[in-house]
Amino acid sequence: MRRNLLLSAAGAVALTLVSAVAVSASVSPSLLDKLNATLSAPVANGVDQRQKDYNQALHDEIVKLEERVTALEKSAGSSPPPAPLPMSALWTAGMEAGTLDEWKQGLPAGGGEYNDGTGASITSMAAARTGTYGLRQTADAAVGGNATRMFRWAETRSHTRTIQGAWYRFPANIFPGAPSNFFNLAQFKSVDPLNPSTNVPAWVLGLKVRDNLNYLYLAEHDLTNGNWISHNAPAGVNLPAAGTWVWIEMELHQSDTTTGRVIVRSGTDRASLTTVLDKRNVQTKATGHENVWSTNCYPGEGTTQGGSTTITVDVDDVEISAVVAPTVPGLPR
């Protein structure tokens, strides 16, 4: 019985303090006076020791909580409010060891580098946005088929909804040219986990040029008939000038039917990204497959950058996080 009374007292104190803090950030002195009077009064007929215990517990709790409120008031007056907690990352890569070992972490091999022809991914001090090293990806577009891709699949195996993002810098605008007219910056592939050599690009994030600026587009691969559908960023939604670091992320909701979703966001400030494209009710992988993500320097034949067919992409501070709640427009993720 006494334990229940104390619990009731704590609950009453909590409610009292919520109201008090909202109004005046302190406990009413008159309430303490009344309690003190109750404690000093003699026990009358019908009032046993349990009532005094109750009053005593209530008084003690209010005094303690009043002291805490006063301390919080002083702290709030001298310190800025705490920053919102960032989304928890599943995996990050800053290349600060001067190697690409972070890309292999997990599973025990959760990703890695895959090159064709002259394509190469290296760590470079010249590609660092923060710290000492970043990732520099290069490939020659004089002929087709040269490419470099840095893959991660550990996170998409363990989570069906993920956000894959990184800071990118293009030393000069990238111009996809004839005959290929494409540049593959990042992608989600559909892969057979029992036979990884059976894989196909499902969603490709590419670059085009307008208004003397690069802009993003999504190439959707119809996994039933093999056709490709291109979705361009809206007019005016371009990347910043060449040489500027820009955050680009792809949110994936995996589905082997038509319940998936692919969202692309970008911006120079992660706190206020622009939603560039949002494709809902889509298929992201074939039946029995899994999605994997890669960031690439994959130019089609004829692509140029700064008048050269040698294409360079700098990447740093890569992050993959889990989508912990449905994305609702206007609300933080």
Image (spheres, grey):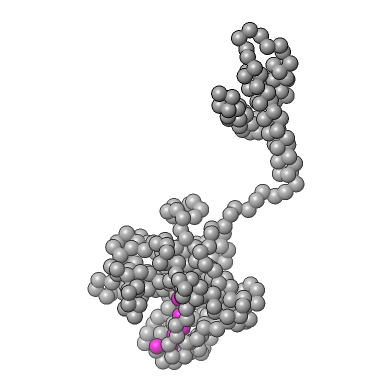
Q: Residue at x 71, y 41 (%)?
A: 72
Q: What quarter of the picture does the N terminus occupy? A: top right
Does residue 261 appear to the left or right of 165 in the view shown? left
Question: Front-most of 48 and 279?
Answer: 48
Q: Position of residue 308 (x, y in %)?
A: 51, 90
**Which quarter of the picture shows residue 42?**
top right
Q: Position of residue 245 (x, y in %)?
A: 58, 72
**Which quarter of the picture shows residue 134?**
bottom right
Q: Main secondary structure of the magenta part?
A: strand
**Which quarter of the picture shows residue 49?**
top right
Question: Front-most of 315 and 305?
Answer: 315
Does residue 181 appear to the left or right of 164 in the view shown? left
Q: Position of residue 222 (x, y in %)?
A: 29, 71
| Residue found at the far top of this picture | 45
Q: How many numbered discs, if any?
A: 0
Q: Residue at x 65, y 77 (%)?
A: 132
**What range of the chain is rendered magenta?**
145-151
Does residue 200 appear to the left or right of 19 in the view shown? left
| 147 in magenta | yes
Q: Residue at x 63, y 53 (%)?
A: 83
Q: Position of residue 297 (x, y in %)?
A: 47, 81
| 193 in magenta | no
Q: Visible in this render: residue 266? A: no
Q: Residue at x 50, y 76 (%)?
A: 104
